[in-house]
Amino acid sequence: MKEIRISIDRGGTFTDVYAHCKAHDPPAIILKLLSVDPANYDDAPTEGIRRVLSHFSGSVILKGTLLDLSNVESIRMGTTVATNALLERKGDRVAFLVTKGFGNILDIGQQARPSIFDLTISKLNTLYDSVFEIDERVTMEEYSEDPDPVQLKAADDTDLVQGTTGETVRILKRIDITQVQAVLNEIKFSGITSLAISFMHSYVFPAHEETVARLARNMGFDVSVSSEIQPAIKLVSRANSATADAYLSPITARYVQNIGKGFKGGLKAVGDRLLFMQSDGGLTSWSKFSGLKAILSGPAGGVVGYSQTSYDHNESNSGKKVPILGFDMGGTSTDVSRYDGMLSHIFETTTAQITIQSPQLDINTVAAGGGSILAWRNGLFVVGPESASAHPGPACYRKGGPLTVTDANLFLGRLLPEEFPCIFGPEENLPLDREVVRTKFEVITAIINADKRAADPKYHIDITPEEVALGFLIVANEAMCRPIRTLTEGKGYIASAHNLASFGGAGGQHACSVAANLGINRVIIHKYSAILSAYGMALADVVHEVQRPESAAFTAKSLVGLRARLEALKQECIYEISQQDFNSAAIEVEMYLNIRYKGTETSLMVGVGPVDTFEAIQTSFEAQHFQQFGFSLERDLLVNDIRCRGVGKSKTSNGKSPYTELATVAKVPLTTREIKRVYFENTGWVDAAVFRIEALTPGAQVTGPAMIIDKTQTIVVTPRSVATALEEHVVIDLNFQSSSSPNEDVSDKIDPIMLSVFGHRFMSIAEQMGQTLQKTSISTNIKERLDFSCALFSPDGGLVANAPHIPVHLGSMSSAVGYQKSYWGKKLYPGDVLMCNHPAYGGSHLPDITIITPVFHPDDSNQIIFWTAARGHHSDIGGITAGSMPPFSKEIWEEGATIEAFKIVKNGVFDETGAVDLLYTQPSKYPGCTGSRSLKDSISDLKAQIAANNKGINLITQVIKDFGLCTVQRYMFAIQENAEQSVRNLLKKFYQKFAGVPLEAQEQIDDGTPINLEITINGETGDAVFDFTGTGPQVYGNLNAPKSITSSAILYVLRSLISVDIPLNQGCLRPITIKIPTGTLLSPSKGAATVGGNVETSQRITDTVLKAFQVMGASQGTCNNLTFGFGGEELPDGSIKPGFGYYETIAGGAGAGDGWDGQSGVQVHMTNTRSTDPEIFEKRYPVILREFSFRKGSGGNGKYNGGDGVIRDIEFRVPVQVSILSERRTTAPYGMGGGQPGAKGRNLWMRKVNTEDEWEVVSIGGKNTCKVSTGDRIIIQTPGGGGFGATGQVAESGLSKRQNNFDSTKFIPRASGSVAERTFLGEGSA
């Protein structure tokens, strides 16, 4: 009889094993092994199984013996093998086959750089060894922005076929089998055996991929086909998924095969009893386990573990089930997640800079774990993101490691050295070293006190080493709370309305503090919390998922066909799971429709029950949408995908409900004689009782301060909290001190610990504002390209926190707030919201509309206590051209609506009539101009901006409630002062570097207008004067840049030159005096055209400042602004011609610096906009993207080479008006230190002449508008970056060839869930 069930989590450092045999007493066994221990065993999981079988059989099974699994019911495993291979770039060699013209598509990706302030633009390598372009092509025949769509029939044209979604696909170039065969032979000869295939639109037309895959498999290749792996729109994500699968699956397959070698009869004898955990939280047979679905194999087990053991469907809190927040704190990072009765999945994530499409649990990794390094930097306590890793490890490991979170816990008595084995030191035979930790904390404390006294002569009260250690823990806890707030409050949930399920090796030491920080009253810790991932696998279900693309309106009529297709997928799921020894009674199938509003790109998975009506499903979607985004729309619904998740239910019981047991068990307060001294906030050193988990019987209660320990974990029970032992859990109820108002500190003292905490809080608010805006907006520019910024401002209008969205907005938003504050004076009242966009008054350019909300003191309607603001790029606000980015505008009215100051909301009422007048009626009064061509979207986006501001108000109001208004405002100003000091220190260093000599630079825009700069630095104070005297006059064109743009460029450069994170706020500009003569290019008149100043001149200002500092070669120096569209003009009958407008910016080459090559095909400096995916581009607009690739050789040569620009070749399928606004077409991006300049850009128009077979290529210059005909092509060749250092010099850095140097101390999140994805998007949004 098969009675033994084994679950294994093979982590990077340790392998955890949980096994159960009901015939044995006790039935369970737990093991913890080193994952790599070649002196004792070849494979940790196999060794774990050997020990389990030996334990339950009562006889020792010798090492090396083939294991007899006849008594084993199941082996369930999670592994980090795929995760580590992806992070460290140690997968198999892969050849990538892609549609012709897209050979560099995964190098370019979404064209955004990973971190906007990293001048080196450091990237991990792509996953493939070589790429081959296949000469095949299809496109979508219809386009969704068509104002007058015509229903097509595929039979009308032999090149038209019906795709899998029912949409019409045009075959432009059928696949050439001969070419494919030659390519496959070349790959075979190179020794590569793993292929990834991804062709344009294969999600809807997979035939070409299937043809190539069939040929390749017949030749013996392992093939990953994008349309098979995840048939969903987005070429970049789907191609990344295919390459990741090809890259990782051979690794996982060899790993599985290696495990099978240790079993009698091998894997065939094991059959489906060997299961692996997938990223979606479901198990699958070893034979179906793929690398792509293994990335979160380990963490997924933990989520299943706490969801099955810590959530009770019957528990209620005021009639509502209490959701759970998962808190998994390990050695290098912490994973956070949420469970409310159903596992939460996301379907596109970015892990290790690879964006993939595959169902994954929504797990978010934070750079704060036990091994996170502690640092005092620029006046702030900093925790991580660097980690001490396993080697050298924390300072207490006796290997010369740095101070870490673990050391802080040890120093404060929260870890007991005597409870750890003597495995530390060079010989791995010593206990944890408390003395070296004490010494290191004394050293860093002395540095902190010295710095504080130097910065503030009034600083007389020195901080103690204990306070320093505690301060780092407080900051670490705040860092971990920040993504939890985004995961909850950012999605419309209240963080405090959850319970916290803590697990992981370090979770118990921080759980109470994290819960208290979030206002959570209850912490639940399972007895197997230290190995919960392994235990979770014992509780997990076998899962088979199927998802298929759709393109259907959601109506009562279409639901009939959708149900039929869902039923087919359901039967597929049932069949696949039944093949794994499940009967029909044990199989459940969940069905979903992926629904969105028409005109938006945010879709939601909506469960579909067997009897749900159209109305019920629609109501469910609207309820979900309102929960997450706070609004509903009067729009048609569309279905993007259908999905079925088949579940083979686990036979393992998840044990007793902790809630039921807690309510019924008799409580017995305990005391103990074992006392240890522990340091807590507000109490200092106190006696804490120490209890052993195994000695606690159900009902035993421990009141904090206390510690509960066993061999694998330490649980810290904070003062006044009460821990209750249950049969399988420890439940800690926190006892908050009740207070009707905060105990406010009214002194002027600035606590460096609280300064660090408030830095996190303020940034969290700005981030959540951005998340709200992105989610609630309508337009492509804001929702998908994320062309927006959100920020929080102090009462005087100074910037406090700006989530890193758009560099060009950084300094200018505070100018806008300051102007509105001055303009309205005492005429602002509660319920007012302001709208503005004028460049002369703090705007950047007219399409960027800023919404500003003043927030008043609750007891004084005349006192503004802070401001929130959201700026977004609207796709069209009128003017002479579609997209409101005219290349030849001479006056500002030609660029669209101008708004100096307007109350968009007055006394809480949205003035839509006034908004329509400003955006549509007023612009159309000028000759040759129209009003907004996308008015409806703009109105919706304005409401989304207002919602984002309100989100910020709600969050900062809660902070004020917690700490008091005076305290919050004091730290608002203090965080600005901290940033100010960081910039002063930077400028002092440059003063020393250049021996006090003023720094000078000259650049010019393409028309020859000069930009002159002299920087004079005061070496004592760190003040600096940026003097632009000598800059040319205002131009009769649109490259004029208002003063706020110059402020933004200087702020961006200064922040980028500081190599570590600092608060990004108004303080950065306080040491700076900017002198710009009035009437010049950088200080134009009120009526001057400025649309190009924001996107083009801003780049040249940045190049000029960097040139003065002699940091790097120039980057491409342009945004390459391309717009096209039609419609918007008034017809003879008075109606408006329907149409559309599209706007994009295009990547180019980045400049090289001293130690790095410039990156190719990337957005630079003042922009970081993501590109629209090629498939979405063609589905939405009447275009064919013929090429998007590197412009090889366009980067300047040097000791370090500049990055290459790109070629973007667009064919138009209907007549449209196209406009280009670009720079660096007559002046090349400079090289630095002897490096060669990058190539200048070119804009070409390929048009028909007379007959269809005759073409001509015309250069249209840097700025032009043209009316293109059907079949015409616009080809943009963007500039390359300048080189650094003379050619021929030997590069000393490994970065010179863009080699991937994986650094184990550098934080790369293993799980990039919805929170991390939001951060990534935010940094790709300029």
Image (cartoon, rainbow, N blue to C red):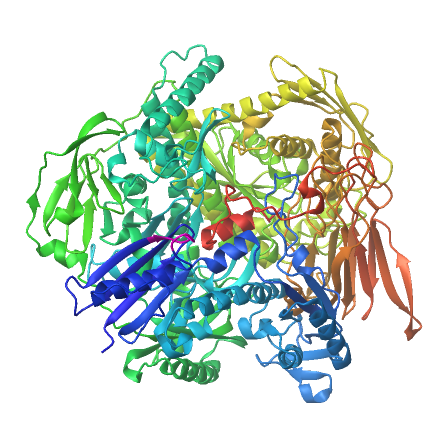
Q: Position of residue 1261 (x, y in %)?
A: 86, 51
Q: Which sits in the foreground, 788 or 931?
A: 788
On the image, which quarter does residue 458 sit in? top left
Q: Position of residue 1083 (x, y in %)?
A: 74, 30
Q: Extreme bottom residue here?
A: 155
On the image, which quarter does residue 702 sit in? top left
Any magenta on residue 39? yes
Q: Is residue 1023 above or below residue 357?
A: above
Any magenta on residue 1029? no
User: Who's the residue at 73% across and 74% down the image?
Assistant: 185
Give, as a single range, the part of the protein colored magenta.
33-40
On the image, which quarter does residue 78 sit in? bottom left
Q: Position of residue 196 (x, y in %)?
A: 62, 69
Q: Which sits in the foreground, 1248 or 1102?
A: 1102
Q: Which sits in the foreground, 768 or 1126?
A: 768
Q: Quadrant of the N terminus?
A: bottom left
